[in-house]
């Protein structure tokens, strides 16, 4: 004890240990919270007793949890006795710390939360002008329920940056709005959390801030100084409201590839403005006001310069013949890297299919499989894509209700987990109004017209990779919360998959159709109305979808709403 070595008297005074993080109050602590609290008391008094000859005294803030400072603090049980003067675990930990620690090991620390990532594109929008610059931004969705509150309204979020500012736009889907509560966080509003230096140890830098704007445009901040140079705009829309913010950089000189800590929280008041529901992007604890530990990450990116299209090399180039295309096809769909050895290609069939599953035009496409990652990359040429699109056009001419699409079947490719196409190819399919179905061993993913349009708008570089991954997840690979949700909601633990879609290695949420292999028995086939499908969030929250069973391929099909875990099942209900 360094202080004692100076000859000074050493005292510990006003001691209490609330449950939870410093500066917060946990009025409903769990058993694990209280065990951890008592263990900390035991650790402290184990040290105090070993060095008792150097301590003058140890005093506590109060006598019991009922009369400690501030009535709110009592809820986190910081002292040795409860309000009835019953001894708590904290008391016994203080009386015999060595015995307490030996017989009451602390609960294991929770696994670190997965931090979401997104890109902020370069651009300078004018607030409130529906600026064209927002069209260059990559949209992501704040749609996650936190652990500590009911889920509120969703928001589509876009982020831009320039040499001076960070710009944030949130389009909130919420038509029931209130700002009647004097507490600004108890109003319908958007909160943005920023750590310019990507700190993870609390608000510790000049570039760490919390910025809140309600639907009427009123701005508020964690600390007054955070509002210096801040500007915002808000307007009510037909589907909710939109908030735009301009947040000045204060601690860093922004540059491409710089990573900042970032999160968004939507405060959503109920109809009578008595309950606040919350939706977040990343921090499952919704504790961004107190700590930046679980904020997501945003990378400052720039729109890449378009690459001049080149033709795939070949030893024996075919004679030039006019391609029978109805849509001009640029020849950038596949360009092998000169400095990476290409795996031996596998030949698969890409075909057009109508709504009844009947195959029309088909072409053989060589693909490469990365055996380490399970990723498949097609080596198709512009002519092969043109042939498929011509087949689509011909089918539509014969029958305008044919509703054809393109199917890429990798379901028999052993080890295949994901598929890569590029932004330019997605744009071609989008312009032709052609959905694309990717069949993988774990199930099928169909990129709808809306999804293809979102991909095409995500990046100016036509070669930017888009990776669609769908993998079957055995129960042993799932968290306890997800396993429990599968069991409680009548899903099959053999029909759980994880969907991941990334653009330039950043996760994006796209509206896609998902099909999960799930065989029904003969008796179940007679009552298909009890088929279930749903999405399971990381915290175990389930969102059910209407599922359709395809007896021909033994799959349950439904429309998903972005990355995450999906499951299918069968449960008879009254």
Image (cartoon, rainbow, N blue to C red):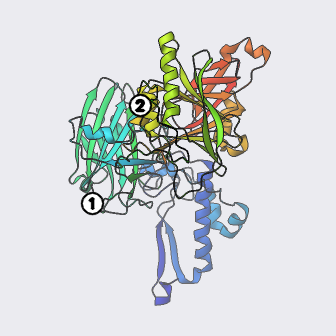
* Residue 326, placed above or below residue 188: above
Vertical side of 503 occupied by 447: above or below? above
Residue at horizontal 65 percent and vertical 35 percent from the top: 348
User: Is residue 152 something one can see in this rendering?
Assistant: no
Q: Crowding at label 2, few (<14), some or many (≥20) Cα neighbours within 10 Å? A: many
Q: Is residue 572 left or right of residue 324?
A: right
Nearer to the camera, 308 or 10: 308
Few, some or many C-alpha atoms within 10 Å of disc 1 (few <14, some 14-19, many ≥20)? some
Position of 171 with respect to 310 (left or right) is left
Residue at screen point 69% across, 61% down: 105
Q: Which mark is residue 402?
A: none
Number of marks: 2
Q: State the residue in front, 248 or 217.
A: 248
Q: Most extreme residue toward the right, as rendered?
A: 522
Residue to which mark 1 is pinned: 250
Residue appearing at x 24%, y 34% in the figure? 130
Which tag is nearer the camera, tag 2 or tag 1?
A: 2
Question: Which corner quadrant of the image does residue 360 belong to?
Answer: top right
Report x, y in % for residue 451. 46, 31
Q: 467 or 287, which is in the foreground?
A: 467
Badge 2 is on which residue?
453
Residue 311 shows in the view: yes
Residue 301: % across, % down: 36, 52
Q: Earlier in the sequence, mark 2 or mark 1?
A: 1
Residue 332, quarter of the rendered image: top left
- Residue 65: x percent and y percent? 51, 53
């Amino acid at each position: 004890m360094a202080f004692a070595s100076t000859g000074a008297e050493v005292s510990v005074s006003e001691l209490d240990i609330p449950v939870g993080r410093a500066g917060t109050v946990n009025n409903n602590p769990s058993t694990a919270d209280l065990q951890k609290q008592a263990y900390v008391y035991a650790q402290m008094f184990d040290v105090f007793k070993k060095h008792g000859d150097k301590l003058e005294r140890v005093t506590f803030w109060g006598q019991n949890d009922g009369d400690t400072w501030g009535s709110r603090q009592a809820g986190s049980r910081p002292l040795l006795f409860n309000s009835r003067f019953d001894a708590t675990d904290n008391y016994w930990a203080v009386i015999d710390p060595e015995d307490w620690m030996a017989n009451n090991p602390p609960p294991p620390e929770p696994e670190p939360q997965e931090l979401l990532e997104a890109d902020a594109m370069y651009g300078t929008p004018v607030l409130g002008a529906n600026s064209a610059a927002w069209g260059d931004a990559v949209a992501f969705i704040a749609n996650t329920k936190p652990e500590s509150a009911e889920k509120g309204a969703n928001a589509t979020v876009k982020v831009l940056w320039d040499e001076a500012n960070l710009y944030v736009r949130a389009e909130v889907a919420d038509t029931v709005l209130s700002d009647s509560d004097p507490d600004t966080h108890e109003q319908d509003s958007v909160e943005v959390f920023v750590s310019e230096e990507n700190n993870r140890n609390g608000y510790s830098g000049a570039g760490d801030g919390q910025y809140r704007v309600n639907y009427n445009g009123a701005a508020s901040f964690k600390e007054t100084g955070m509002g210096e140079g801040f500007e915002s705009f808000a307007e009510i829309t037909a589907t909710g409201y939109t908030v735009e913010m301009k947040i000045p950089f204060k601690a860093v000189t922004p540059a491409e590839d710089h990573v900042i800590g970032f999160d968004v929280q939507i405060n959503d008041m109920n109809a009578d403005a008595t309950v606040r529901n919350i939706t977040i992007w990343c921090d499952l604890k919704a504790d961004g006001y107190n700590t930046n530990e679980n904020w997501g990450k945003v990378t400052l990116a720039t729109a890449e310069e378009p690459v001049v299209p080149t033709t795939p090399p070949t030893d024996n180039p075919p004679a030039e013949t006019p391609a029978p295309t109805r849509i001009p096809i640029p020849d950038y769909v596949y360009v092998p890297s000169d400095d990476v050895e290409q795996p031996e290609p596998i030949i698969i069939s890409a075909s057009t299919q109508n709504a009844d599953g009947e195959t029309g035009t088909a072409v053989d496409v060589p693909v490469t499989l990365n055996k380490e990652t399970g990723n498949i990359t097609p080596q198709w040429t512009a002519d092969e894509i043109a042939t498929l699109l011509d087949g689509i056009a011909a089918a539509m001419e014969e029958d305008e209700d044919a509703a054809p699409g393109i199917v890429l079947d990798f379901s028999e490719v052993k080890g295949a987990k994901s598929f890569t196409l590029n932004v330019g190819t997605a744009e071609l399919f989008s312009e032709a109004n052609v959905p694309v179905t990717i069949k993988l061993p774990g199930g099928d993913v169909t990129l709808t017209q809306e999804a293809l349009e979102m991909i095409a708008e995500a990046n100016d570089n036509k070669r930017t990779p888009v990776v669609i991954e769908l993998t079957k997840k055995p129960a042993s690979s799932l968290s306890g919360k997800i396993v429990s949700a599968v069991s409680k909601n009548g899903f099959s633990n053999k029909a759980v998959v994880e969907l991941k879609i990334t653009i330039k290695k950043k996760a994006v949420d796209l509206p896609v159709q998902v099909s999960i292999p799930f065989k029904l028995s003969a008796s179940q086939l007679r009552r298909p109305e009890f088929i279930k499908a749903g999405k399971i969030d990381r915290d175990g929250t389930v969102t059910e979808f209407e599922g359709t069973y395809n007896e021909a391929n033994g799959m349950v099909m439904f429309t998903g709403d972005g990355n995450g875990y999906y499951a299918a099942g069968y449960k008879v209900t009254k």
